Amino acid sequence: MRYLLRTGLLGAISTGFTLLRGTRDKPITWRAALGWLSWAITLALAIGAVSDLRRQERGLPVAVDSPFAPKPDKKTVRKTRRKEVARIAAER
């Protein structure tokens, strides 16, 4: 249950019900199609967040683009960039 409240999954599901009620008796227009597309993307992102959260809690690797992925130390990133810039400057 805590996964539903922490990741926006509950919000995505309730938005889907609201969208369904609003488009039930009306013809499908491009606005309705965009609404459904937007809802599907939101639901997919919420499900992905739940999946990443569970993987992280179990100690399994998480995708690099996930908000739950471990972030590199800023100092290490700066040193790496400086070395890269120095290498490029030396090649010129």
Image (cartoon, rainbow, N blue to C red):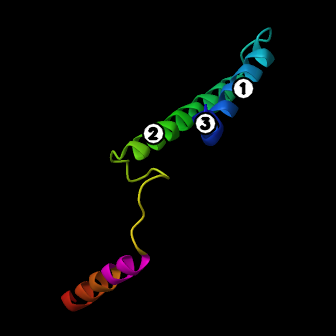
**Percent of width and height locating residue 11:** 69, 33
**Residue 54: which disc?**
2
- In this rendering, position of residue 46 left or right of residue 12: left
User: Where is residue 47 shown, x and y percent of the image?
Assistant: 52, 33
Local packing at callout 1 (Cα closer than 10 Å; few below 14, some 14-19, many 20+) is few
Nearer the observer, 11 or 28: 11
Find the magenta span and give its range: 74-80
Q: Is residue 30 visible?
A: no
Residue at mark 1 = 14
Query: Which disc number belongs to residue 85?
Result: none
Instruction: Determine the main secondary structure of the stretch shown in magenta.
Output: helix
| Kind of residue indicated by mark 1 | Ser
Amino acid at circle 3: Arg
Relative to 70, does residue 35 appear above or below in the rendering? above
In this view, the mark in front (2 or 1):
2
Residue 2 is labelled as 3
41 falls in the magenta region:
no
Quarter of the image with the C terminus is bottom left
Helix, strand, or loop for circle 3?
A: helix
Image coordinates for residue 31, horizontal then vertical, percent: 73, 27
- Count of picture labels: 3
**What residue is rendered at 80% in x and 18% in y?**
22
Q: Report how far apart the C-alphas of labels 2 and 3 lie in the structure.
A: 11 Å
Mark 3 or mark 2, which is nearer the start of the sequence? Answer: 3
Q: As drawn, which residue projects farthest toward the left?
A: 91
Q: Is residue 18 left or right of residue 57?
A: right
| Residue 77 drawn in magenta | yes
Crowdedness of circle 3 by 10 Å Cα count: few (<14), some, many (20+)?
few
Circle 2: element type: helix
Which residue is painted at 40% across and 41% down in the image?
55
Farthest residue to the top: give it: 25
Mark with earlier residue (3, 1)? 3
